[in-house]
Image (cartoon, grey):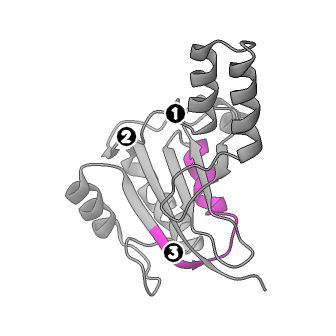
Amino acid sequence: MSDRVATEILIGGTLPHALVPAFLQTADADGASVEFGEHATMTPEELRAAVTSTRGPLRLVDTEHEPGGFEQLEAFCRTHRLAYDRRQEAKYDADGVLVKWRPGMQTPWETFASQDGIPLIHHATITRIARRLARRELPVPDAVLQLRRLAGAHIRRVPPLVITRRPHRCSPSARTS
């Protein structure tokens, strides 16, 4: 059995009221809760309270999560067009990881990260860009763009999570499966 690590996910977008039970069931199956410590199943009222109190993205955590993320919860978010950022702390053999997904992305953006969720760019990559800049093979604006993409700075922040009574609209790929 692998070592477990602290993991958090920020979720935002529009969650139709009719999907709240499925969302809670998925979060519970993945071991996510609103506070670090012992896992506790969230009720719909607790979810609404968490959403209203933050007026931002919903933050769910797991103190002792298996490396690799909240697989079911992330799949639910992608299917139902909910944006998310997941941060996994480093521990022993597990690297720190930052994963971001927004509606419209084909696959999640992922990189190594510090304990604080700050994206890490490999030294060899920085050196390669610096050499190309020094040889004038790479214009400065292009270098800046490359570095911003490597750091995930081109991805918008996770919006607030809003529970609405509007009808559900899942992603096109979810409709075909």
- The crowd level at tag 3 (other Cα within 10 Å; few <14, some 14-19, many 20+) is many
Residue range in magenta is 61-79
Q: Amino acid at mark 1?
A: Ile
What residue appears at the point 35 percent right and 36 percent down from the top-left corner? Answer: 166
What is the distance, in whole Å, between disc 1 and disc 2 at their CAs?
12 Å
Q: Nearer the viewer, residue 19 or 55?
A: 55
Q: In what element is the residue under mark 3?
A: strand
The nearer-to-camera label among 1 and 3 is: 1
* Residue contact between numbered discs 2 and 3, judged by CB atoms under 8 Å: no
Q: Amino acid at mark 2?
A: Pro
Q: Amino acid at mark 3?
A: Asp
Query: Is 65 one of the magenta-colored residues?
Result: yes
Q: Position of residue 74 (x, y in %)?
A: 60, 54
Query: Is 119 one of the magenta-colored residues?
Result: no
Mark 1 sits on what residue?
155
Q: Earlier in the sequence, mark 2 or mark 3?
A: 3
| 131 sits left or right of 103 in the view | right
Against 31, is 125 above or below?
above
Mark 3 sits on what residue?
62
What residue appears at the point 44 percent right and 65 percent down from the top-left corner? Answer: 60
Note whether residue 69 is visible.
yes
Mark 2 sits on what residue?
159
Q: Position of residue 96 (x, y in %)?
A: 63, 63
Residue 41, label in figure: none
Q: Nearer the viewer, residue 97 or 24?
A: 97
